[in-house]
Amino acid sequence: MQDILNYFVNHRHNLNEKFVPKSVTGRIHKLNRNDRDKLKSELFTKAKEFETKIDFSAIDWIQVCLNVIDKNAFHFNQVFFSPGHEIKDEIRNLLRRAESSVDLCIFTITDNELAGEIISCYKRGVNVRIITDDEKTEDNGSEIYRLSTTEIPVKIDHSHYHMHNKFGIIDNKFAITGSFNWTYTATKHNQENLLATSKFEIVKQYSEEFEQLWQKLFDL
């Protein structure tokens, strides 16, 4: 984020939103809502420093900066359905694009291909955490013990009832949720749905719920 700030500051006398290089707009596109807000806050701080400069309009400059940020902000809201590979393909794509963190709160995982994608995330340095239902870890075909043996941290409930959530947060940038269990049956036969969204307020609420569950549940 600092390099984006530096670009805006260094080009404050000739900044034109039509000619911002892709190297900058691409980095803006990767920022989540929280990071964009931090960047805007730092730009306003800089604008206050510059507002006394002769022959320089801090107001015009900050407006161009905000236009560039908003124009290149990442937004994604889409619903996917099964049977068929639409949901599975989207989950696979999200996991492959993950850069920093993957938090999954999934009732059951028996699809070994999706489990393999989770392991690939972990092996390339992504911080992965999994919450799942204790009883489902004993199902035939459950991938949970395979995941835990790769040292991915897994937490479970100890309850007569179920940890029945099916949601995930990727890079604190988007959330996925819906009826879809990570199983072959859900892909091939069941009527299921998955919502993927980058809407900050939704991602934040799911992230907070995951953290609460992570603190109170039990290590596998």
Image: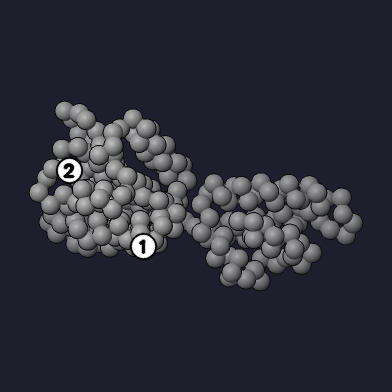
Mark 1–mark 2 Cα distance, whole angstroms, equals 25 Å
State yes or no: discs 1 and 2 in contact (Cβ < 8 Å): no
Q: Which residue is mark 2?
A: 137
Q: Residues within 10 Å of mark 2 (few under 14, many from 20)?
A: some
Rendered-image quadrant of the C terminus: top left
Across and down, in percent, residue 116 comes to: 26, 60
- Circle nearer the N terminus (1, 2): 1
Q: Residue furthest top?
A: 160
Q: Answer whether residue 15 is visible to the viewer in this image.
A: yes
Given residues 19 and 105, the one toward you in this image is 105
Examine the rendered structure and indicate whether residue 86 appears above or below residue 181: below
In the image: residue 38, left or right of residue 183: right
Given residues 92 and 67, the one toward you in this image is 92
What amino acid is found at the position of numbered circle 2 in the picture?
Thr
Q: Quadrant of residue 215?
A: top left
Examine the rendered structure and indicate whether residue 201 appears above or below residue 174: above
Across and down, in percent, residue 146 comes to: 21, 52
Q: Which residue is mark 1?
A: 96
What amino acid is found at the position of numbered circle 1 in the picture?
Arg
Name the mark on residue 37: none
Residue at image location 20% in from the left, 34% down from the top: 162
Across and down, in percent, residue 119 comes to: 30, 57
Given residues 71 and 118, the one toward you in this image is 118
Rendered-image quadrant of the N terminus: bottom right
Across and down, in percent, residue 78 comes to: 36, 55
Q: Quadrant of residue 11?
A: bottom right
Residue at image location 40% in from the left, 55% down from the top: 126
